[in-house]
Image: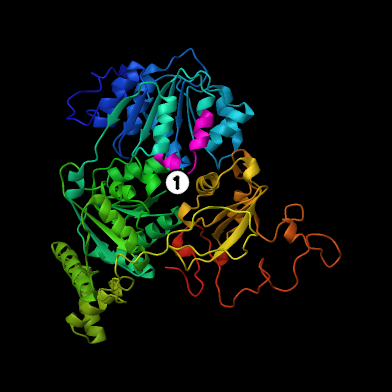
Amino acid sequence: MSDSENTTSFEALGMPEFVLKTLSELGYESPSPIQAASIPVFMSGADLIGQAQTGTGKTAAFALPLLAKLEDDLHKPQGLIMAPTRELAIQVAEAFQRYARYRKGFRIAPIYGGQDFRPQLKLLKQGVQVVVGTPGRLLDHLRRGSLDISEVKTLVLDEADEMLRMGFIEDVEEILSHCSGEQQTALFSATMPAPIKRIADKYLTDPQHVVIQAKTATVERINQSYWLVDGRQKPEALRRYLETRSFDAMIVFVRTRESASEVAEKVNAWGYRAEAIHGAISQNQREKTINGLKKSKFDILVATDVAARGLDVDRFSHVVNYDIPYDSESYVHRIGRTGRAGRDGEAVLFVTQRETRLLKTIERHIKQQIERAQIPNNDVVQQQRVERFKQQVAEQAAKAPSALIQSVVEQCCHDLEIEPEYLAGVLINMLHSEHPLEPREEIKQQRERNREEGGKRRGELQLDESPIETAPNPLPDYPDVEMERFRIEVGRRSGIKPRDIVGAIANEAGIESTFIGDIILRDEFSTVDLPSGMPKELFNQMKKIRVRGTPIRITRYGKETPDMAPPSKRKPSAKGKPGGKPSGDRGPSGKKPAGGKKKFGDSKKFGDKSGFKSKKTKRS
């Protein structure tokens, strides 16, 4: 089944009255292609494989028919949705709550890591009809017997390719083994790699295929360009972009929640109206922010990729990729936020010298070259500011100043013995003391190196029997990020694989997989390289992480407690007891740290590249 013109209605798809009433209030006039193709399959009870990009309406495609088929007298979970991240799980749960507005007694339990077990246990004990959660936390509940999915009638794997990338596929298979095997199963994925196809072949019965082709016309309607910037000058580049563009609403994409808050704060300080949205904000605040954007209470949204999924706002005329995405699909999803409803849009990428390889990858994916544009220089910015000021003066000139104001002007000119023109200049300086018409700094125009130059590919995750090197390798993409080695108490005998560790750390601690370095598996323990200077709060949070049900009990490598230390590290202390530290200010390798190296420990941020400390200077 493929994409086709949509001429049907939700009523024709068999949606019950309570669903139709809700959709009418939400402004849904007709189903999207993925909804029109998927809902009949769900209603028929057949298994389904859906291929469609994020932002095409997949959530409603499975949520609406699932709500329509719920049995009121069954108090065990009837629907189970697996999502790769806590942010997506929360988003899906929110969507169910919206669609079930007029369905009496509907109960849903969002189950994800990073949250206390107690409220989840309470919800499950009270009885819910739908459970949506991340694979790791769902497995935890299954193993402790607090979740019973034997009566699940509809199971949905949402963004299956993302679950594969994060290393959750084995967890997904274990969860599927707890089901009755008679449930209706649906798998949604933007791509269909071999492991996902294997899952589909093994667990789906005669599935119907729904393929919604990505619309290239949307990309073609968008004017795309990139600015080559020094990372430290990104804020100034963003300011110049804002000042030289006329826009209705703009979305600025960043990689981390810390960056989202910081960038929004800067934009507000420049005199614009901006809000941040990321995975750490509450459900109520997120909905309030989206409603404020739709009602034009502010014009600039700073967002992370996950938080922006499912965001349906037609106001966006411009998209700024403040941080370039690591994968091409994310780029397409991002710029697809503009150029909607047949309108043209504009998208710009901020690219550093190290990221030109990522730019080349994106160009190959979209099959077109993205043109480089010059960052507006001081003359251009100054002219824009002057024109904007003149427009403001013209608007105020239509309102005659009061007699008092006229008198004050005359008094100032007389008492200070200055001409009116000079007084006007003084007043302009006073008015623009914080935001002068003349730019205070000139932005550095970067010269572009050969795009074919690519850094070394990130090292493969390792299984190793040789002695562990105590000096972590730098990240190829971020060589100025200083790394530190950590020990975790799970190894090959725990049945874990490197992807399990990556998935757990990325999902539970919120550290992007890009900043997770080499992983070395041993029989009883493993080591993982992470950026140095981890904040105490995050370090304590990571101690609670479980990989396949086993706590990792993370410690800094070479600084383990005696019972955790590998044999080669169990040295007698000065008192003859095991676990003593080597003498002197020496690291795990026994070498004194090089002078002048700055670690991340002085920063309040973790996972935000603007917070990393390089070996010589602050990382851009």
Instruction: Name which quarter of the figure residue 429 lies in.
Output: bottom left
Whether residue 239 is in magenta: the answer is no
Which quadrant of the rendered structure holds the N terminus?
top left
Say if 220 sits above or below 168 in the image.
below
Q: Inspect the image, locate mark 1, and give the three-letter code of the amino acid beneath it.
A: Gly
Q: Is residue 351 left or right of residue 392?
A: right
> Where on the picture, by quarter, is residue 46?
top left
Where is residue 308? Give x, y as percent: 36, 45
> Which residue is more in the foreground, 558 or 219?
558
Colouring chosen for the image of the structure: rainbow
How many numbered tags mark residues here?
1
- Say whether residue 157 is visible: no
Q: Main secondary structure of the magenta part?
A: helix
Query: Could you say where residue 272 lies in the image, as x and y percent from the top left?
Result: 30, 59
- Residue range of the region highlighted in magenta in the rendering: 157-175
* Residue at the farthest bottom position: 417
Q: Is residue 110 above or below residue 485?
A: above
Is 168 covered by the magenta stretch? yes
Q: Residue lying furthest front in this view? A: 466
Residue with the mark numbered 1: 279
